[in-house]
Image: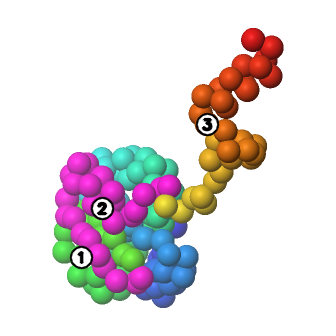
């Protein structure tokens, strides 16, 4: 998980994600913040559940410039950015609220997948009805 240490690095992450059409979920945290440390495992789990979004952490003590630019006044604060603009925010270590925020703004993980191939579409059914297809399948098996 990326941890930008400067505002320039933070802006670069937002720009890369915007170019890729991804949302960026930011955890503004601090090492001394108890609630931040308690919700950290859930944040990591959500990052693996929502691979279509970019999850990063900003330590407010190490990267004060970014924290000030984003007007972070409490920890933890979670923000979601899309196209380099803030689209959602939640303050506090609220597991249900965090999950809802991410579900609302990160998008469906299947939306980044291709169309794939429908089952059976590789075979030409020759205009057969479903019943005829099943009978043909049974015949091929010798039943």
Mark found first going from the N terminus, 3 or 2? 2
Mark 3 to mark 2 CA distance (whole Å): 41 Å
Mark 2 to mark 1 CA distance (whole Å): 21 Å
Q: Residue furthest top?
A: 143
Q: Which mark is residue 129?
A: 3
Read off the residue under disc 2.
Answer: 104
Q: How many other residues sit within 10 Å of disc 2, few (<14), some (14-19) or many (≥20)?
A: few
Q: Position of residue 141 (x, y in %)?
A: 78, 18
Q: How many other residues sit within 10 Å of disc 1, few (<14), some (14-19) or many (≥20)?
A: some
Residue 34 seen from this side: no
Taking the magenta stretch, the answer to whether it contains residue 102 is yes
- Magenta segment, which residues? 83-110
Answer with left or right where residue 6 lies relative to residue 92. right
Between disc 1 and disc 3, the foreground one is 3
Residue 46 seen from this side: yes
Check disc 1 and report its element: helix, strand or loop: loop
Mark found first going from the N terminus, 2 or 1? 1
Taking the magenta stretch, the answer to whether it contains residue 99 is yes
Q: Quadrant of residue 56?
A: bottom left
Q: Which mark is residue 72?
A: 1
């Amino acid at each position: 998980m990326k941890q930008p240490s400067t505002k320039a690095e933070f802006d670069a992450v937002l720009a890369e994600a915007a170019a890729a059409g991804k949302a960026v979920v930011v955890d503004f945290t601090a090492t001394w913040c108890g609630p931040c440390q308690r919700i950290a495992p859930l944040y990591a789990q959500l990052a693996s559940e929502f691979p279509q979004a970019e999850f990063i952490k900003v330590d407010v003590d190490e990267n004060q410039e970014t924290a000030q630019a984003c007007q972070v006044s409490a920890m933890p604060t979670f923000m979601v950015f899309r196209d380099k603009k803030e689209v959602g925010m939640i303050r506090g270590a609220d597991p249900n609220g965090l999950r809802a925020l991410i579900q609302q703004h990160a998008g469906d993980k299947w939306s980044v997948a291709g169309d794939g191939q429908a089952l059976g579409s590789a075979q030409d059914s020759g205009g057969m009805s479903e019943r005829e297809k099943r009978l043909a399948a049974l015949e091929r098996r010798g039943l």
